[in-house]
Image (cartoon, grey):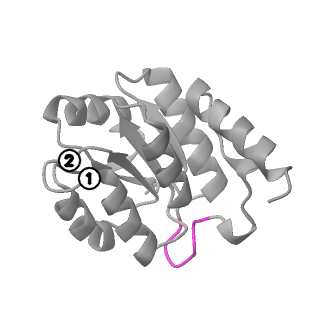
Amino acid sequence: MEKKFKILIIEDDEGIQESLKVLLGDKYSLKTAGLGNDGLSDLKAFNPNLVLLDLILPDTDGLSVLKRIRTSDENLPVIMITAYKSIKNTKKALELGVTDFIYKPFNRNELTSIIEKVLFKTGLPNEGQDTYIDFTKFDISSIITQNPAMLKVFREINHISKTDS
């Protein structure tokens, strides 16, 4: 039996959950959670290769969930899904190690392209082996995105990194 990548979707909007199931369900093994705390509970049991995480959740915010994900697994790819474009949230999510952002309403092709690129970097799912890349050698040039807002942030980070303190 072919092993599929596992994606945990932490998203409270049932319509978006259903859209993601239709879009991704044939290719990936999916688990959905409508609350941040439920998603965190599912994290260990489901052992996903990727998390799609909403920024705004009824019980907590996505940044808090991301922070807790990072305490248990610093290498797990997390793509933040949000309708709210905020430099503050983007900066905080980058500091916490988010892999990429996708903005609602999302473009199906852009989302599937980002997911495929992220999962391609992690390798094939294989029980008993670490399926993640080593992010300790990770630099900003390794982040895959076509999002204009993210590209602007990366250009600013690149510019700032070249200045003295």
Give the residue at mark 1: 61
Residue at x 43% of width, y 76% of height: 71
Q: Position of residue 19 (x, y in %)?
A: 26, 28
User: Can residue 104 be seen in the rendering of this structure?
Assistant: yes
- Indicate the quadrant where residue 63 lies: bottom left
Mark 1 neighbour density, 10 Å: few (under 14) some (14–19) many (20 or more): some
Mark 2 neighbour density, 10 Å: few (under 14) some (14–19) many (20 or more): some
Q: Which residues are magenta?
A: 126-132
Residue at x 20% of width, y 56% of height: 60
Q: CA distance from mark 2 to mark 1?
A: 5 Å
Residue 11 vertical position relative to residue 40 in the rendered view, above or below: above
Q: Give SS at disc 2.
A: loop
Query: Please, what is the three-letter code of the amino acid marked with disc 2?
Result: Leu
Q: Position of residue 42 (x, y in %)?
A: 24, 66
Quadrant where the N terminus is found in the figure: bottom left
Mark 2 and mark 1 residues within 8 Å of each other at the beta carbon: yes
Most frequent secondary structure within the magenta stretch: loop
Q: Nearer the viewer, residue 69 or 30?
A: 69
Residue furthest toward the front?
165
Residue 114 vertical position relative to residue 141 in the rendered view, above or below: above
Quadrant where the C terminus is found in the figure: bottom right
Residue at x 55% of width, y 52% of height: 94
Q: Is residue 50 left or right of residue 45?
A: right
Give the residue at mark 2: 57
